[in-house]
Amino acid sequence: MSRFFEKTDTSITPERARPGRSNYRASTASRSPRFSSVNPAASRIVPLRAFTLIEIMIVMAIIAIVMTIGVPSMMRGLEKDDLTRAIRDTIEGCKTARDRAILQGVPHEFVIHVEGDRATLNVRALPQEQRGPFAAQTVDMHIAASQAIPAGPYSGFPRPLGDDVIVQMVDVNFVNHMDESEARVRFFPNGTCDEFTVVYSWKGKQRTVMADVVTGLANEFIKQ
């Protein structure tokens, strides 16, 4: 009996009855995820954040607005040639008067005011009594209110000419205005304007600006 129990006792011992079973369990446990050396958080995919197309377009629109407002003023400040600045201011003044006349339905004028040795460029709405057939046009309330608004903060008018820039000739509708203190060039809501020619000189150089009566566009006249 003692041998039987001893034998039976030996048979139920896993290590002695089945020597290979313990190795199998050990190898199975080593492959268990509980004992894996790989970190589950490291294998998780993290989504990347990026800008949407709408956000990019909004940023580009803001940059374009800032450049439109700031670049002309910055270029005028960096411009060392007073003659080039006078040409640019004259063309921009004519364009501003033309745009306002078309958008507001009210004639505007570009004015060259000379007082002593100094000249000033300005843009303003034509007085009511001088508007002629355009005075009878029907104007909306918001347009009528905008007539009293002076030049905006970004238009930069009035602007002075350089101290050394000389106005050599000013013709409006083929009439010389050199003997007058002001030369007014009218721009109308239909896009037309008065005939206009101005000649500036600076340190022996001369440059000319002319306005087209049909389109109302002012450009520098360059001899071919």
Image: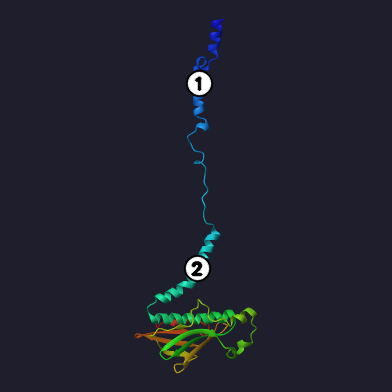
Q: Are marks 2 and 1 in contact (CB under 8 Å)?
A: no
Tell me which label, 2 or 1, sits earlier in the chain: 1
- Its colouring scheme is rainbow
Q: Nearer the viewer, mark 2 or mark 1?
A: 1
Location of residue 129 in the rendering, given as x and y in whole percent from the top left corner: 59, 91
Q: Amino acid at mark 2?
A: Ala
Residue tagged by mark 1?
A: 22
Q: Amino acid at mark 1?
A: Ser
Please tell me whether mark 1 sits on a helix, a strand or a loop.
Answer: helix
Instruction: Pick out the residue farthest to the bottom.
Output: 179
Q: Residue at x 55, y 5 (%)?
A: 2
Extreme-left residue of the structure: 204
What residue is at 48 percent from the left and 90 percent from the top?
183
What is the quadrant of the C terminus in the image? bottom left
Q: Residue furthest top?
A: 1
Along the line of sight, the residue nearer the viewer: 19 or 6: 6
122 versus 34 height, above or below: below
Q: Residue at x 55, y 11 (%)?
A: 9
The residue drawn where x is 59% and y is 80% is 146
Mark 1 surroundings within 10 Å by alpha-carbon count, few (fewer than 14), some (14 through 19), many (20 or more): few
- Report x, y in % for residue 168: 40, 89
Residue 140's mark? none
- What is the number of the mark on residue 64? 2
How far from the left and from the top, in percent, is residue 69? 49, 72
Q: Quadrant of the N terminus?
A: top right
* Residue 131 horizontal/vertical position (percent): 59, 88
- Say whether residue 217 is visible: no
Q: Is residue 113 visible?
A: yes
Q: Nearer the viewer, residue 149 or 138?
A: 149
